[in-house]
Image (cartoon, helix red, strand yellow):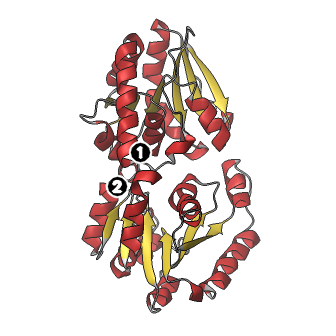
Amino acid sequence: MNILFLTKYDNLAASSRLRAFQYQNKINSSKSKSRVDVQALLSNSYLEKKFNNKHVSFIHLIYLFFKRLYFLFKIVKYEIIIIHIELFPFVPPIFEWFLFKTNKKIYFDYDDAIFHTYDLSKNFYINFFLSSKISYLMKMSEGVIAGNSYIENYAKTSGARNILVLPTVIDIDQYAVKAKELSDSKFFTIGWIGSPSTSKYLEIVKEPLQRLGEKIPVTLYLVGANNSHKLMIDNIKIVYLDWSEKNEQKALKEFDVGIMPLYDEPWDRGKCAFKLIQYMASYLPVVASNVGMNTEIINNQGTGFIAESPNEWFDSLYKIYCDSDNRKIMGNNGRKLIEKNFTIQSRLSDFEDFIS
């Protein structure tokens, strides 16, 4: 069985790396008779320019468009095609319609509420012509792979025939095999992993972190934000680290707690809480906004705290700082939860069964 992933981005993007390339590596290195290929629409060079706020030429985008279009003529050898989000953003589903007319099994994979890019757009033309695009793709597909229950509910409303709720999972072999020893450092290290586009959420925790810094010595460790964000918080030492898989793992070993602030807005409710999954896999307690999948992962699991207000953010972080024994318990609880439900080792068979 030959499987093709058609992703929006190349492997520099976490969504593609974890929801396509990771499966390619695991399946191709196994004894399975299936073979997996990945073709990305937007290249790593495009992503690097976007991350660094550099200009991307229109000619380059046209080149990438035709590169994918050319590849679509070579899909004969694949029985199963998994499309991450859509074939071409901001284009009506003409090319997907042609794929639906083939004898291929077409699946769509969503790890963000991308449908809100269209149905909540303030641009009249985007809203008018594309608001129902993702709903149409879900309905016409063989099945939908949804990263969380928010996306699952949208798929159900759209009339999707088959739905698999499959969170963005990690390869547990890439994470620490045991919890780190409590550090003698006088600083309490609060960690965040993200990208320049998600660093806006750090505004949520500025005020509670400033208050925390007045009581205890705090380091805020930011991976992927890049220092062009110019975040300044009184009383807080801020460390910036460029994102790479190596730097990510290095940073996780330095954190005492991981945070995931979000706004309570439609787009954010569709996020798959991947930061929390990474923190918990590293035996870390977590604090997160009471939004979407964050709540599902943390509530009643003994892995950390949900925070809805600046006071709750402050109280949660201060409790974790003061109680090192509970910090260790929450970290161990989180690791067990991830091993059970959020690793490719535990979920690969679900994926293979769904598309077979």
Residue occupying image coordinates x 36% and y 70% = 354
> Where does the image place residue 150, in percent across and percent down from the top left?
31, 56
Which structural element holds mark 2? Answer: loop
Residue 187 % position (x, y) = 55, 12
Q: How many marks?
A: 2
Looking at the image, residue 127 sits to the left or right of residue 10; the answer is left
Would you call the spot at circle 1 few (<14 residues within 10 Å), some (14-19), or many (20 or more)? Answer: many
Quadrant location of the C terminus in the rendered image: bottom left
Quarter of the image for residue 134 reads: bottom left
In the displayed structure, 96 sits above or below 135; it is: below
Q: Is residue 158 above or below residue 202?
A: below
Q: Are the two marked residues, 2 and 1, in contact with CB atoms closer than 8 angstroms?
A: yes
Name the residue: 58% across, 66% down.
28
On screen, residue 245 above or below 252: below
**Which residue, given by chain and number where applicable, does mark 2 sit on?**
148
- The residue pinned by badge 1 equals 273
Q: Residues within 10 Å of mark 2 (few under 14, many from 20)?
A: many
Q: Earlier in the sequence, mark 2 or mark 1?
A: 2
Residue kind at label 2, given as amino acid type: Asn
Side of 25 relative to 129 (left or right): right
| 77 left or right, relative to 179 | right
Q: Work out whether 250 lies above or below 266.
A: above
Residue 152's image quarter? bottom left
Marks 2 and 1, Cα distance to the nearest angstrom? 9 Å
Q: Looking at the image, can residue 120 be seen?
A: no
Q: Amino acid at mark 1?
A: Ala
Looking at the picture, how far across and down is residue 339, in whole percent? 40, 43
Residue at 40% from the left image edge and 35% from the top image edge: 335
Q: Mark on residue 19?
A: none
Residue 173, horizontal then vertical, whole percent: 54, 43
Disc 1 on helix, strand or loop? loop
